């Protein structure tokens, strides 16, 4: 039995969805293990761009089952819209898509609470996507949450009402408030719950255990990125789930010994959405070019991403945390527009230069130390073979591999499924 993992090594938005889709034909099951609809996985093929928020990225492959694991939090309203968007593609969703009965549900009041809490922080706001993710995970760990399996119980609406009342008390305690019509929002929510109940809701840990015994290959799909992990990310500017390899175990109910390959995905540069420290951020024309050419806008929120040079200090840290065995480099084509390219190899931290990722990553204290490379200044988006890639591009790749001591097995040179080079 083999369980392989796909993980982001930066602050999310690395392109995990595309690579899951690219690798799916080698697996029987694609299993999403954490996060919620704050994540957006973008896939592009046959001239069509698809954005998924909750549904695993293997859904477009006919012979593969897709599982939403217990570690995921599900917004029924967003899930319903995703299903409606996919209906035009004649996918047999009701047989291909499975949902863990232990996955927690995002309530309308979770989203209201999220927005109210963020507004109250003022300049200290975290940069939440306002999708209710944090409050839902808080209720999960506080043992107050509602799980997918609960919606099949007769008294589940009583539990729902009690939790809503708790949320409303907290919301009303804030000085700054947002306007909302809970009755109208609830109407949409309960209609979406009906749609959710139409799908196969299963004991996912037993399903995966049986799949392992029968020799099926499983690909676990992560969301966000390592540097947003609740424990090991740039706290408090992080998400509310375990985005690292450990999250696949708790988010799917699989044992650590069952994990085989760990694919770590990173961009040829670095991006970040929302607030938080970002040592290699570029605040000049180069950053603007990077954002424009790379189309650096969130697939879920539409928010502009901050852009910067590749940070090897952060990458080494992420590789260590996750036990990465293979690397995937995305968006190499975006850097074709630069005469000179930089890579951060260490930090100057309070007059001491080192390559250890610090406890407190404050851009006011940390100065990145760069190694500079000549750009290849050639369009590589139509290249299909490693042998055709420019020498200067390969020098960039080889330097990264030497520093990280992990092979880069896949290179993406564009958003389409076909724009992928396997080495």
Image (cartoon, rainbow, N blue to C red):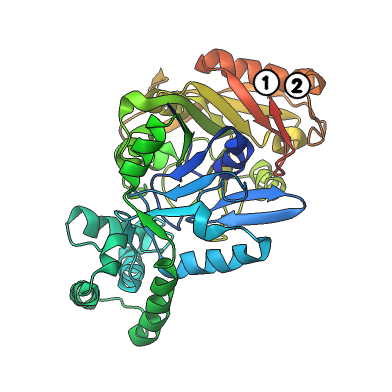
Quickly name the residue at label 2: 386
Label 2 Cα crowd, 10 Å radius (few <14 / some 14-19 / many 20+): few
Q: In this view of the protein, which residue sits in the foreground, 35 or 123?
A: 35
Gap between marks 1 and 2, in whole Å? Answer: 7 Å
Image spot of residue 171 (x, y percent): 25, 74
Query: How many other residues sit within 10 Å of disc 1, few (<14), some (14-19) or many (≥20)?
Result: few
Q: Nearer the viewer, residue 77 or 373?
A: 77
Q: Residue at x 53, y 23 (%)?
A: 326
Q: Which mark is residue 423?
A: 1
SS of the residue at dot 1?
Answer: loop
Left or right: 290 in relation to 318: right
Looking at the image, which is closer to me, 340 or 32? 32
Image: 238 above or below 86: above
Q: Position of residue 302 (x, y in %)?
A: 57, 60
Mark 1 vs 2, N-terminal side: 2
* Residue 213 falls left or right of residue 218: left
Circles 1 and 2 in contact, beta carbons < 8 Å: yes
Q: Quadrant of the C terminus?
A: top right
């Amino acid at each position: 039995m083999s369980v392989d993992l796909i993980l982001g090594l930066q602050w999310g938005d690395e392109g995990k969805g595309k690579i899951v889709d690219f690798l799916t034909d080698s697996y029987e099951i694609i299993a999403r293990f954490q996060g919620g609809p704050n994540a957006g996985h973008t896939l592009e093929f046959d001239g069509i761009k698809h954005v998924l928020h909750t549904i695993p990225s293997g859904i477009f492959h006919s012979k593969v089952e897709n599982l939403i694991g217990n570690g995921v939090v599900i917004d029924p309203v967003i899930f319903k819209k995703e299903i409606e968007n996919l209906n035009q593609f004649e996918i047999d969703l009701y047989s291909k898509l499975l949902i863990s009965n232990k996955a927690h549900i995002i309530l309308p009041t979770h989203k209201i609470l999220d927005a109210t809490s963020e507004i109250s922080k003022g300049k200290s706001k975290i940069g939440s996507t306002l999708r209710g993710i944090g409050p839902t995970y808080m209720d999960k760990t506080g043992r107050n949450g509602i799980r997918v399996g609960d919606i099949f119980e007769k008294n589940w609406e009583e539990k729902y009402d009690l939790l809503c009342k708790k949320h409303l008390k907290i919301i009303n305690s804030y000085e700054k408030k947002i306007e909302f019509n809970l009755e109208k929002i609830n109407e949409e929510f309960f209609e979406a719950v009906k749609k959710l109940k139409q799908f196969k809701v299963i004991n996912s840990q037993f399903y995966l255990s049986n799949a392992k015994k029968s020799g099926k290959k499983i690909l676990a799909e992560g969301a966000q990125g390592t540097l947003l992990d609740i424990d090991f990310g740039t706290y408090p500017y992080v998400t509310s789930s375990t985005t690292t390899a450990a999250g696949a175990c708790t988010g799917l109910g699989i044992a650590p010994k069952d994990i085989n390959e760990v694919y770590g995905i990173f961009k040829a540069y670095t991006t970040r959405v929302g607030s938080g420290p970002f040592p290699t951020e570029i605040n000049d024309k180069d950053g603007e070019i990077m954002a424009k050419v790379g189309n650096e806008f969130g697939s879920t929120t539409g928010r502009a991403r901050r852009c910067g040079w590749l940070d090897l200090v952060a990458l080494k840290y992420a590789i260590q945390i996750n036990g990465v065995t293979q690397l995937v480099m995305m968006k190499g084509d975006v850097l074709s527009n630069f005469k000179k390219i930089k890579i951060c190899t260490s930090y100057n931290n309070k007059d001491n230069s080192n390559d250890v990722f610090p406890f407190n990553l404050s851009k006011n204290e940390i100065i990145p130390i760069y190694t500079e490379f000549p750009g290849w200044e050639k369009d590589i988006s139509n290249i299909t073979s490693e042998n055709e890639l420019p020498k200067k591009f390969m020098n960039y790749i080889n330097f990264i591999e030497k520093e990280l001591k992990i092979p880069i097995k896949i290179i993406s040179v564009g958003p389409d499924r076909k724009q992928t080079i396997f080495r």
